[in-house]
Every structure is written in C-alpha cells, then in structure tokens.
Amino acid sequence: MFRVMIRGKFVGLDDAGRDAVQTAGGAAFTETGAFTHDGSFAAFTFRCQVPAGPDDGEPEATRKAVAALDAHGHAYHLLKVAVTDMRQIKIRQKGRRR
C-alpha cells in the first residue's frame, strides 16, 4: 500500500468545482482521494491511498494517484508529490523490554 500526497494549485475552479472539492474533502487517505484546501480554493493537498503490487514502486504509485486526481476533473498545476511506501513502515511494539 502506498500513501500519496499531491500538492497543487487549482486553475479556473468555478462554483460547481468548489462544491465538488468541498464534497470530496477530508484528511483521510482513500483510494478515490480526498482534498484539503486553503480558504480561497487556490491551493490544495490531495491524499490518495494506492494498492501496491509486488513490483510496484514510487513511479507507479505516483501515476495511479495522479490518475485518481485527474478523475475528479479539475484543472490544476502540480507542485509537489510525496509517496510513502507503507510496506516499509516498521511499527515498534510498546512494552517489549529485555
């Protein structure tokens, strides 16, 4: 599983687009993606969770996340993409002492 955060700026977002972004808002990582935005709807962060195949890496995760962003249909300028491979995250267990 990958978690991808895309930062960008909307281009020409109209009232219907603002309503759609507001509806798809949230801070959670989902497969369809969720938006957080500034008050003017100019800048945004898009959070997306992408399933990982055995040979998938950051480039594949980025392509899938951008495709999920494009599926929302809003014009944007891409500023930054950050990918986290959740398969590489190690969780320390509390209470395990020697």
Image (cartoon, rainbow, N blue to C red):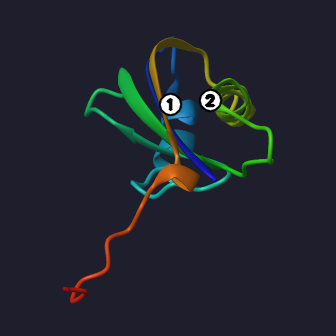
In the rendering, at what x and y percent does residue 64 appear? 73, 34
- Point out which mark residue 15 bears: 1
Left or right of 15 on screen, residue 64? right
Displayed quadrant of residue 96: bottom left
- Point out which mark residue 58 bears: 2
Q: Quadrant of the C terminus?
A: bottom left
Q: Is residue 93 above or below residue 16?
A: below
| Residue lying at 59% horizontally and 56% vertically, measured from the top left | 30
Q: Closest to the observer: 47 or 56?
A: 56
The nearer-to-camera label among 1 and 2 is 2
Q: Secondary structure at mark 2?
A: helix
Residue type (three-letter) at the residue carrying disc 1: Asp
Query: How far is the residue under mark 1 from the one under mark 2?
Result: 34 Å
Q: Residues within 10 Å of mark 2 (few under 14, many from 20)?
A: some
| Residue lying at 64% horizontally and 53% vertically, measured from the top left | 1
From this viewpoint, which residue is outermost toward the front?
98
Left or right of 84 on screen, residue 33? right
In the rendering, at what x and y percent does residue 46 appear? 49, 37
| Residue lying at 25% horizontally and 34% vertically, measured from the top left | 39
Left or right of 23 on screen, residue 38? left
Residue type (three-letter) at the residue carrying disc 2: Glu
Q: Secondary structure at mark 1?
A: helix
Q: Is residue 75 above or below residue 27?
A: above
N-term mark: 1 or 2: 1
| Residue lying at 28% horizontally and 32% vertically, measured from the top left | 38
